[in-house]
Image (cartoon, rainbow, N blue to C red):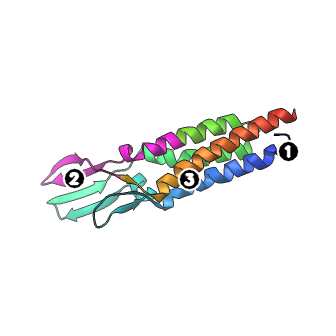
Amino acid sequence: MKNLKPARLIVVGAILGLLSSLMILLPVLSVSTPEGTYTGIELTFGKELLNWGGFVSAKIMFSPLNLLAFALPLLGSLCLLFFRKSQMIGAVVFIIAAILLFFLPNFTTVNQTILGTTSEIDIDWTMDIGLIAAMSLSMIAAVFSILGAVAEKELQ
């Protein structure tokens, strides 16, 4: 551990956290329909899936927990870069983000409206490459953050 430089570990952790947040741009969840993959932006901010006039419509609703899941790695990265001795706080933020990302399919709701009656649809989501990468990058960023804290502690 003596040859590891804490500053490098912290920067690598911050870069990984930033990359985890950028996974919102990739396909995150998929279903077995013809239009089957949805990006993190669509799942977070909502998307109209179907609209047949006033008779039938379906849309993915805005999800604040999805927004939090993708924003926390960015917050952890900023914490690592701009606050001294905040590696453990950054690690906790990255771990919480990974847990929220794991439960992202549960936080995503789709509402359907048929002749003015609105109900929630239960969809069997499948994790796609963007979600798996975001979870993995967030956990690896947490490991680098913890290693940075340990390496800094050994230098003192």
To which residue does mark 3 refer? 21
Q: Position of residue 81 (x, y in %)?
A: 72, 47
Q: In terms of depth relative to the viewer, which is nearer, 42 or 88?
A: 88
Which secondary structure lies at badge 2? strand
- Disc 1 from disc 2: Cα separation: 58 Å
- Disc 3 from disc 2: Cα separation: 29 Å
Q: Which mark is residue 3?
A: 1
Q: In terms of depth relative to the viewer, which is nearer, 47 or 11?
A: 11
Q: Residue 153 carries which label?
A: none
Q: Position of residue 109 (x, y in %)?
A: 32, 48
Q: Where is residue 67 in the image (x, y as percent from the top left)?
A: 47, 48
Query: Sequence order check: which comes first, mark 3 or mark 2?
Result: 3
Task: Tell me, yes or no, whether the two marked residues, 3 and 1, touch with CB atoms within 8 Å.
Answer: no
Q: Position of residue 63 (x, y in %)?
A: 40, 47
Rate crowding at label 3 as few (under 14), some (14 to 19) or many (20 or more) other CA atoms within 10 Å.
many
Query: To which quarter of the image does residue 37 belong?
Result: bottom left
Query: Sequence order check: which comes first, mark 3 or mark 1?
Result: 1
Identify residue type, mark 3.
Answer: Ser
Q: Which residue is drawn at 56% across and 53% down?
A: 21
Range of the magenta residues? 98-125
Residue 44, above or below 68: below
Query: To which quarter of the image does residue 4 belong?
Result: top right
To which residue does mark 2 refer? 112
Q: Can residue 60 be seen in this view?
A: yes
Task: Tell me, yes or no, whether the two marked residues, 1 and 2, touch with CB atoms within 8 Å.
Answer: no
Is 115 in the magenta? yes
Q: Which residue is drawn at 81% across and 37% down?
A: 152
How many labels, in total?
Answer: 3
Q: Nearer the viewer, mark 3 or mark 1?
A: 1
- Disc 3 from disc 1: Cα separation: 30 Å
